[in-house]
Image: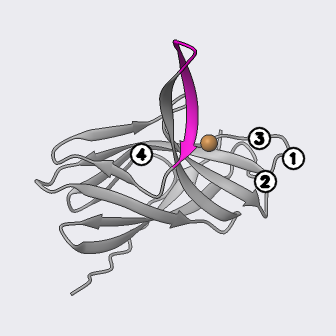
Amino acid sequence: MKRILSVLILSSGLLCAGDIEIENPWIRAVPPSSGATAAFMTIANHSDKLLTVTGGSTPVAREVKPMVTTKSRVNGQEVMGMEFVTSFTVEAEKKRVLEPGGDHIMLMKLKEVPKAGAVVPLTLEIESGGRKEKITLQIPVR
Ligand SMILES: [Cu+2]
């Protein structure tokens, strides 16, 4: 059986939905001509099961996709890159930090360019132990 849980918080801070805690979420303010921006946060998994962020949605963008940093070797040199992935995982009792220069959530094909000081809703689809949950965060733009 699937359980859908929806939780709302105001502005920044902490969200606790059972075993999932989202710390310090924020969205990067971008110039009006930008087609994309990114969301950052720390996802804490307090359960004993693997947690997977399988997707997301927001009224301000047509596409929401997880992106991770990659390391590859080109001509013997280590090269850092970025790559879209279908999901993020967070190990049991661990945290995953999404931060500038590292893993993040891309908001693309912006319908509305988030301005500094605004608060943008972002819904994350999360799976844990065969259970699916939706968490809606109210994320400050800065
Ligand atoms: Cu990106």
Q: Residue 131 placed where, x, y %?
A: 24, 74
Q: Label 1 near label 3: C-beta < 8 Å?
A: no
**Label 3 residue SS:** loop
- Dot 4 corresponds to which residue? 13
Q: Label 2 near label 1: C-beta < 8 Å?
A: yes
Q: Earlier in the sequence, mark 1 or mark 4?
A: 4
The outermost residue toward the front is 75
The kind of residue on which mark 1 rests is: Pro
Say which of marks 4 and 3 sits in front.
3
Q: Earlier in the sequence, mark 4 or mark 3?
A: 4
Counting other residues with Cα less than 10 Å from the Cα at mark 1, is it few (<14), some (14-19), or many (20 or more)? few
Which residue is drawn at the image coordinates 32% and 58% (left, top)? 52
**Label 1 residue SS:** loop
What is the spatial separation of the Cα atoms under label 4 and label 2, in whole angstroms? 23 Å
Which residue is drawn at the image coordinates 51% and 64% (left, top)? 56
Task: Give the quadrant of the C terminus.
Answer: top right
Query: Which of 100/25 is in front?
Result: 100
Q: Earlier in the sequence, mark 1 or mark 2?
A: 1
- Dot 2 corresponds to which residue? 113
Q: Residue 30 placed where, x, y %?
A: 76, 41
Q: Earlier in the sequence, mark 4 or mark 2?
A: 4
Residue 32, labelled with which disc? 1
